[in-house]
Image (cartoon, coloured by chain):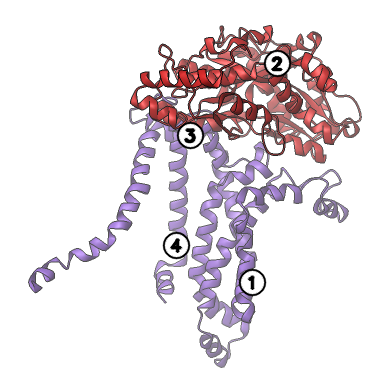
């Protein structure tokens, strides 16, 4: 009996992996297979023929390169802005929040109690031509007297930044919160000024949070289409808008599928480069700690 | 109502129908057409009503009184059925995206009647794909009330598959105070520097391209490559100069009301509704004409043909049509509804945007059905509006 259990023991980890693997298989691998097959097909809904149409990829990328570049650009700027806003915020909550920490965190998450669409529509009102914001900016001559915010790139980037901000704040907070204060104290005992101890101790230790936050913000932002649709104009449309209209209006599923794959690939490459730059060893070590 | 079922007769029919129903048909009838395949095919239409009839429509497109729809409540009482009324159609393309999966697999979409716009090209395409049931005209004697202008659309010449719910005109909606003059020309809309960034066009291809073609002196009901390219070039120029702010669906309405948009391509019925709160706003056909489109009641494959047809018949009773019209403000396709409204709400009966006079209808044009499903054109247009 004991021998039998011993012999079967190697199975246990695999058995434990089964639910996760099944999930991945059903909801990721299988859809991926069909998406891939569609991307290599030809035709319009509902008649497709699968014939290794590799040109779908090159054609769709060359046709919509503007929107591709724009998506990465907008998502990049929004991520940088979100990081710049979130870092001090998360730092402050983690180190100075005291007993109000949970309240502040709740406030960060509070907008999530309202649906994404409504939050974005609210920005339509905030940035409207007759809004206080626009009037004020016109009064201080940041905007020309006939200038506007709504239906510009600035509005789309602001919308993206706002909508994905909590995804940046939370991982940053978690990694900052975990930092052992004695390390910072040790740094100052060793005559490091506060900027130096921040740069050499706190910042490196918070990098896993930065990494996670950047991914959680950049990836959905790059594929977003709601912000561009509601706050932008055709000149601001991103690749998500293109994919949406290819699927729903043109019913050109192969092109839409190919575009989705290219977007996925582009994001994956960027993420790998980013991980490389930050140093994966340190990140996983940080995450483990 | 010429076909008034007494309760006894109804029960008798129900019993008779029940015996000839197949098992899947019975399931479908009980589930309001939710089964995999309803028994209702053209030849052996069952003459019984299911317990529940499912009707999908656009939001704010029927009479409302204290959160109920009186015309539907009366229908339910009259026929002893439930109507599940769902307002889940916001956009033809998105709705089609929702139902095309099941329909392409030969499955029912759980709806007996849906409402879709002819100018989206989708009703036409659904007929070609065999995704629509033929109406049971014997159950729709009120079809005689269909206004003559709507009797023979080119995509369904004998109205075998469709009956209009409402129609609407596309023209220019504007705020005369902001614009400073009565704007009724597309060319002014596209070039007046005063309107830069204050103009929106519609994401519906037929509406936007149709009005621009008219302004070019071209015929939108017969699109050629040359007239198409000219219209595309004209819009492209206005977009890249920054004159056009956005392409919108119904969402131009709040923008116009708030003053972010001063003039735009707009639907007549929306403007009637907007005018209730913003009496200053105006709608006009352009100097070169207006576009007209029609939302059609359709029975998707797997829906209960008899039930759908009886429901359509109900709404072609001028009295019921008048109740809907009193609330909806689009163009009524039912003859005689205006006579009813003359007595109950003369202001609506006299509104030219709801019962347009012949002189206004003469200015309206229907978009080319062939061009609607031309993939090349659709691609051009999607690129134009930003994708």
Residue visible at 28% across and 60% down in the picture: A17
Q: Using a 10 Å C-alpha cutoff, classify the residue at mark 1 as few (fewer than 14 neighbours), some (14 to 19) or many (20 or more).
A: some
Observer-nearest of A153 and B63: B63
* Co-location on one chain, circles 1 and 2: no
Q: Using a 10 Å C-alpha cutoff, classify the residue at mark 2 as few (fewer than 14 neighbours), some (14 to 19) or many (20 or more).
A: many
Residue B345 vs residue A3: left or right? right
Q: Give the image quarter of residue A94.
A: bottom right
- Extreme residue in the front direction: B8
Residue B309, above or below B30: above
CA distance separating discs 4 and 1: 30 Å
Q: Give the mark toward the camera: 3 or 1.
A: 1
Q: Position of residue A73 (x, y in %)?
A: 59, 49
Give the secondary structure at mark 1.
Answer: helix
**Chain letter, purple in picture:** A
User: In this figure, which residue is indicated by the disc labeled 3?
Assistant: A60
CA distance separating discs 2 and 3: 52 Å
CA distance separating discs 4 and 3: 28 Å
The N terminus of chain B lies in quadrant = top right
Q: Give the mark toward the camera: 2 or 3.
A: 2
Q: Chain of mark 3?
A: A
Mark 4 and mark 3 lie on one chain; the one further toward the N terminus is 3
**Chain letter, red in picture:** B
Q: Position of residue A122 (x, y in %)?
A: 71, 50
User: In this figure, which residue is indicated by the disc labeled 2?
Assistant: B318
CA distance separating discs 3 and 1: 45 Å
Give the secondary structure at mark 3.
Answer: helix
Q: Which mark is residue A104?
A: 1
Give the secondary structure at mark 2.
Answer: helix
């Amino acid at each position: 009996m004991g021998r039998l259990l011993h012999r079967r023991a190697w199975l246990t980890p695999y058995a434990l992996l089964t639910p996760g693997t099944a999930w991945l298989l059903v909801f990721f691998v299988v859809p991926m297979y069909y998406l891939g097959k569609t991307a290599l097909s030809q035709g319009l809904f509902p008649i497709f023929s699968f014939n290794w149409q590799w040109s779908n990829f090159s054609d769709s990328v060359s046709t919509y390169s503007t929107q591709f570049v724009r998506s990465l650009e907008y998502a990049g700027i929004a991520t940088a802005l979100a990081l710049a806003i979130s870092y001090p915020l998360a730092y402050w909550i983690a180190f100075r929040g005291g007993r109000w920490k949970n309240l502040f965190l709740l406030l960060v998450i509070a907008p999530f109690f309202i649906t994404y669409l409504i939050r974005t529509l609210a920005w339509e009102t905030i940035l409207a031509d007759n809004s206080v914001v626009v009037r004020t900016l016109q009064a201080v001559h940041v905007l020309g007297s006939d200038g506007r915010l709504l239906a510009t790139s600035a509005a789309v980037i602001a919308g993206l930044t706002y909508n994905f901000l909590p995804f940046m704040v939370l991982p940053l907070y978690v990694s900052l919160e975990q930092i052992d204060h004695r390390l910072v104290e040790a740094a100052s005992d060793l005559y490091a000024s506060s900027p130096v101890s921040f740069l050499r101790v706190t910042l490196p230790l918070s990098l896993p949070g930065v990494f996670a936050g950047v991914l959680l913000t950049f990836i959905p932002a790059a594929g977003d289409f709601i912000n561009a649709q509601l706050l932008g104009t055709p000149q601001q449309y991103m690749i998500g808008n293109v994919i949406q209209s290819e699927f729903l209006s043109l019913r050109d599923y192969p092109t839409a599928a190919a575009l989705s794959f290219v977007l996925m690939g582009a994001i994956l490459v960027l993420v790998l480069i980013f991980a490389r730059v930050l140093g994966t060893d340190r990140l996983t070590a940080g995450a483990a700690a | 109502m010429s076909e008034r079922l007494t309760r006894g007769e109804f029960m008798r029919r129900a019993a008779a129908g029940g015996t000839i129903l197949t098992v899947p048909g019975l399931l479908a009838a009980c589930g309001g057409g939710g089964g995999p395949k309803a028994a209702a095919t053209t030849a052996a239409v069952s003459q019984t009503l299911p317990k529940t009839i499912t009707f999908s429509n656009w939001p704010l497109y029927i009479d409302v009184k204290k959160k109920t729809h009186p015309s539907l409540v009366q229908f339910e009482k009259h026929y002893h059925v439930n109507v599940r009324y769902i307002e889940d159609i916001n956009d033809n393309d998105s709705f089609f995206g929702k139902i095309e999966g099941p329909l392409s697999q030969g499955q029912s979409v759980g709806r007996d009647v849906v409402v879709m716009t002819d100018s989206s090209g989708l009703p036409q395409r659904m007929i070609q794909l065999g995704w629509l049931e033929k109406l049971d005209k014997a159950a729709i004697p009120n079809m005689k009330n269909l206004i003559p202008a709507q009797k023979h659309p080119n995509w369904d010449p004998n109205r075998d598959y469709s009956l209009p719910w409402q129609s609407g005109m596309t023209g220019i909606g504007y705020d005369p105070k902001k614009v400073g003059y009565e704007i009724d020309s597309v060319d002014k809309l596209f070039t007046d520097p005063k309107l830069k960034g204050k103009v929106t066009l519609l994401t519906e291809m037929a509406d936007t391209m149709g009005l621009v073609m008219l302004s070019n002196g071209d015929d939108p009901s017969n699109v050629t490559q040359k007239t198409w390219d000219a219209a595309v070039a004209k819009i492209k120029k206005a977009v890249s100069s920054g004159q056009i702010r956005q392409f919108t669906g119904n969402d131009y309405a709040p923008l116009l009301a708030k003053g972010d948009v001063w003039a735009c391509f707009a639907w007549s019925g929306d403007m009637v509704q907007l005018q209730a709160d913003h009496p200053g706003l105006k709608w006009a056909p352009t100097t070169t004409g207006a576009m007209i489109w029609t939302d059609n009641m359709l029975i998707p494959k797997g829906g209960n043909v008899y039930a759908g047809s009886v429901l359509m018949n109900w709404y072609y009773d001028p009295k019921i049509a008048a109740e809907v019209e009193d609330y909806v403000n689009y163009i009524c396709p039912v003859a005689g509804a205006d006579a009813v409204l003359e007595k109950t709400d003369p202001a609506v009966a006299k509104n030219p945007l709801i019962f347009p006079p012949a002189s206004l209808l003469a200015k309206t044009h229907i978009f080319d059905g062939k061009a609607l499903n031309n993939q090349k054109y659709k691609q051009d247009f999607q690129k134009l509006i930003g994708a």
